[in-house]
Image: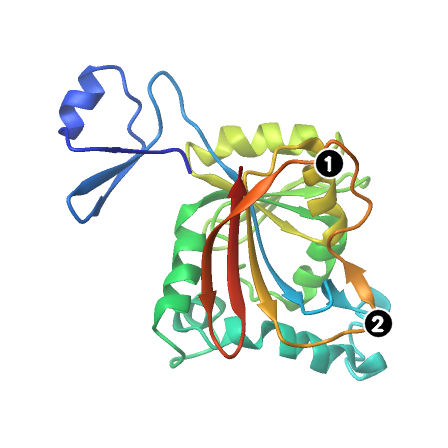
Amino acid sequence: MGEYRCRLGVHFLALAGWVVVGVLSVGRWLVLYGCKGGIVSKVFVNISLSLDGYLAPEGMTMENWDRPEYMDWGAKWGALMGWALNQAYLREKLGIGPGGETGPVNDLVRHTFQRTGAHIMGKRMFDGGERGWPEEAPFHTPVYVLTHQQREPWVRPGGTTFYFINEGPKRALELARQAASGRDIRISGGADVIQQYLNLGVVDELEIALVPVLFGGGRRLFEHLREPLARFRIDQVLGTPAATHLRYVRA
């Protein structure tokens, strides 16, 4: 997110021509969301990844959605996402029930939801979610679905509306920026959609939960990439037994 830290009062900044979208108090600092003369959103990826680089296991397709035992994809997916489903904030969002961890990883999950003003995803991810998400889908923002199919917007309870975009990833990002109102834009997946935005050079941050499981096959995250590629640097590492949480930002 475009963050400008300042010790000055918010009213002074507004008078000086700043667009102040939101303010957080972080110690002695004010974290202002927005910028002078316009609103800046960051584009970020936040995903779980197997140790051998797969975003989803082999066999996890719509044809086998009701057969999680096929190629053991259900157990593999559960192992990949187990760390997340054990976080109190996500359990509340998904309506799983009480309990879960409330430590620093839970804070990361909460921050991801709170910073996001719009989501972009592919049709394959949407198809799986349409069958698996609760009635109140866990986004609470506009969601732009890249697809070749035409479909009217799908409004869900709780503030989530799915828009189906036929004009490609650049158009989806343009619409997401307009809708996000200065908050950040999350490229939710799947792998091919993330690759498209990496190839466009618009991804500002990569947040990867590297999980100690091996898939041996499936959908790889880092393939089909083209030069020139953006350069990233490590910004944060948080290690737990269930996953290593890595945050990369543009160098």
Quadrant of the image occupied by residue 243: bottom right
The total number of labels drawn is 2
**Identity of the residue drawn at 83% across and 73% down:** 64
Local crowd at mark 2 within 10 Å, few (<14), some, or many (≥20)?
many
Could you tell me which secondary element the residue under label 1 belongs to? helix
Seen in the picture, residue 161 relative to 202 is either above or below; the reply is: below
Q: Mark 2: which amino acid?
A: Gly
Disc nearest the viewer among 1 and 2: 1
Q: Which mark is residue 199?
A: 1
Q: Nearer the viewer, residue 129 or 4?
A: 4
**Identity of the residue drawn at 41% across and 46% down:** 115
Seen in the picture, residue 104 relative to 123 is either above or below; the reply is: below
Residue 11 can be seen, yes or no: yes
Locate residue 211, reporting x and y percent. 61, 71
- In 3D space, how far apart are the residues under numbered discs 1 and 2 (Cα atoms)? 26 Å
Q: Mark 1: which amino acid?
A: Asn
**Identity of the residue drawn at 77% across and 48% down:** 192
Q: Which mark is residue 59?
A: 2
- N-terminal of the two: label 1 or label 2? 2
Residue 138 can be seen, yes or no: no
